[in-house]
Amino acid sequence: MIMQTQHLNMAAVDNHSAELLVILVPAGQTGFPSQAYPPSLETLIEHYKKMGDWHSESKYLLCINPPEFKALRILLVNTNLDIVKADAKRISNVVTDVLEQLNQAKADIVMPPSLPGGELLIQALFHASYKFSDYKTKTSRREEISVALLVSDDSLDESLDYARALHNGMSRTRDLANMPGNLCTPGYFAECALALDEQFATISTDVLDEAQLTELGMGAYLAVGRGSVHPGCMPVIRYVGAEPEEPAIWVIGKGVTFDSGGITLKKPPGMQSMIYDMCGGASVIGLMAAVAELKLPVNVTGVIATAENMPDGDAFRPGDILTTMSGQTVEIISTDAEGRLVLCDAITYAKQHQPALIIDVATLTGAQIVSLGSHASGLMGNSPQLNQALQQAGDESGDRAWTMPVWPDYQDALDSPFADMRNAGSQSPGMITAGCYLARFAGNTPWAHLDIAGTSFQYGTGNSATGRPLPLLLQFLRNYSNLSAPQWSINTDACGFLP
Ligand code: BES
Ligand code: MN
Ligand code: ZN
């Protein structure tokens, strides 16, 4: 979607030429109190009221060749006085549906007079315009929608830049996350990471290959990909937006390009949805692009913990004991608890690079879906302030996360008779157990974990990948860049990591 602002004196909106002019009408009114529309609009609304076509229950009304207006068509949309998120979503869907019905690609929208309604509407319009360019060979390509936002001042400019960067990042994430396992392999992730380096002068990418990961001692990371014919790698993407020596925020995404479960093979129904097990990695690609587009004054390093989890004669197996990069050993109970194995070594790698803090994003457990569904990502971490800042960013961006406890009490589920820990509990609360496992690797570095199993995709709906948690992460970075000296204290009572 192409979106631009255009200045307009609202009192002369009848003089504005357009194919489709969208006017928001608060229920029972003829305009917003602070935004004077011309009398011709009132006349028009009165006319349709008399006809019974416009009333308090009306959702929208399309008026063709309205008298005294230069626009060819006017789309009246009933709203609340304060445009909330649900209104914004509804308005956007009406606009895109009507454009489709009319076979038109251009709309001019009279923007609501105040924030945050305008900002929400811009974000919702972008969101409604996303279509996954799928792999059907017979497609009807529609022209890209172009929207002119009619505004009376410059107050929406920053909102538009932010929404555009967020949308571009989310589209990148969704396109990538929707790719199936035969096309999106660890090597493909590496190509995407290198493409960011090409596109942005502020980004530089290194792709660590299997030999380098072996050299680093990433025994857990490498075990996961051993059954796959696709060689493993670990892309590290650096964005420098602040002084180069300032510690970076490290964002690590789980990029398991297909999770068959490995030797602990998953059951067939639903296995195909494990092409989405790389949504965390795809979010990192989209986030880095958005941050670079916005030129945020922070340093951010993105890591894609990528591998394909397949059964094979050389695959790792239940009962194996692996040595992680941290030196801690892990007894494998299930090869299907593979996400934490790639993540733990990536976290150790990040820790060794003096990060300001570490956030990992992962479609980690089915238990997250059972607990919170698609309404909130599961948030866990070792710093109460960091948890709070992330949860707040989720609230502000409408991409919610909910903090789950990772108390020391939950750690016992990971006791192993042979190794320092095992990779899965039995009958334990799965989302929290996974969080507790990762906490052992974060140690005393500020760290948070987002389990996005239920929020990042919805299998079988066409536009399946949602682009979450990009809104939350970008909002967090936006807030962070405005903090002078953020402090994230580690609370060992809140999070029972082992020393
Ligand atoms: N990728 C899955 C989690 C998942 C399930 C994500 C459904 C999205 C939708 C993960 O690797 C997994 O298999 N987790 C296991 C862990 C268990 C073996 C401890 C799970 O949640 O069942
Ligand atoms: Mn798995
Ligand atoms: Zn997985």
Image (cartoon, rainbow, N blue to C red):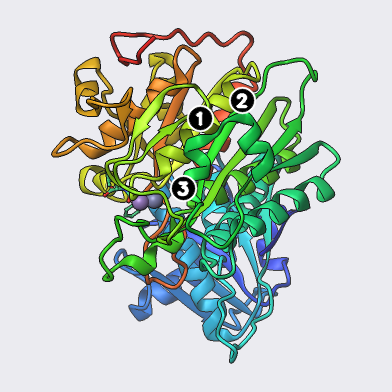
Is 185 above or below relative to 190? below
Within-10-Å neighbours for mark 1: few <14, some 14–19, many 20+: many
User: Earlier along the polypeptide chain: callout 1 or callout 3?
Assistant: 3
Proximity of marks 1 and 3: CB atoms separated by less than 8 Å:
no
What label does residue 359 carry, if any?
1
Residue density around tag 3, few if under 14, some if 14–19, many if 20 or more, within 10 Å:
many
The front one of 413 and 369 is 413
Please report the residue visible at 57 percent of the width from the left and 30 percent of the height from the top.
Answer: 217
SS at circle 3: helix
Residue at 80% across, 45% down? 197
Q: Secondary structure at mark 1?
A: strand
The quarter of the rendered structure image containing the N terminus is: bottom right
Label 3: which residue? 224
Q: Is residue 82 above or below residue 428?
A: below
Q: Given this view, does label 1 or label 3 mark the residue nearer the observer? A: 3
Quick one: label 2, few (<14), some, or many (20+) residues within 10 Å?
Answer: many
Q: Position of residue 409 (x, y in %)?
A: 19, 18
Residue most extreme to the front = 313
Q: Quadrant of residue 52?
A: bottom left
- Name of the residue lying farthest toward the bottom: 138
Q: Which mark is residue 249?
A: 2
Specify the amino acid type for callout 2.
Ile
Q: Amino acid at mark 1?
A: Ile
Residue 21 place in picture, x, y as percent: 62, 69
Locate residue 183: give its quadrant.
Answer: bottom right
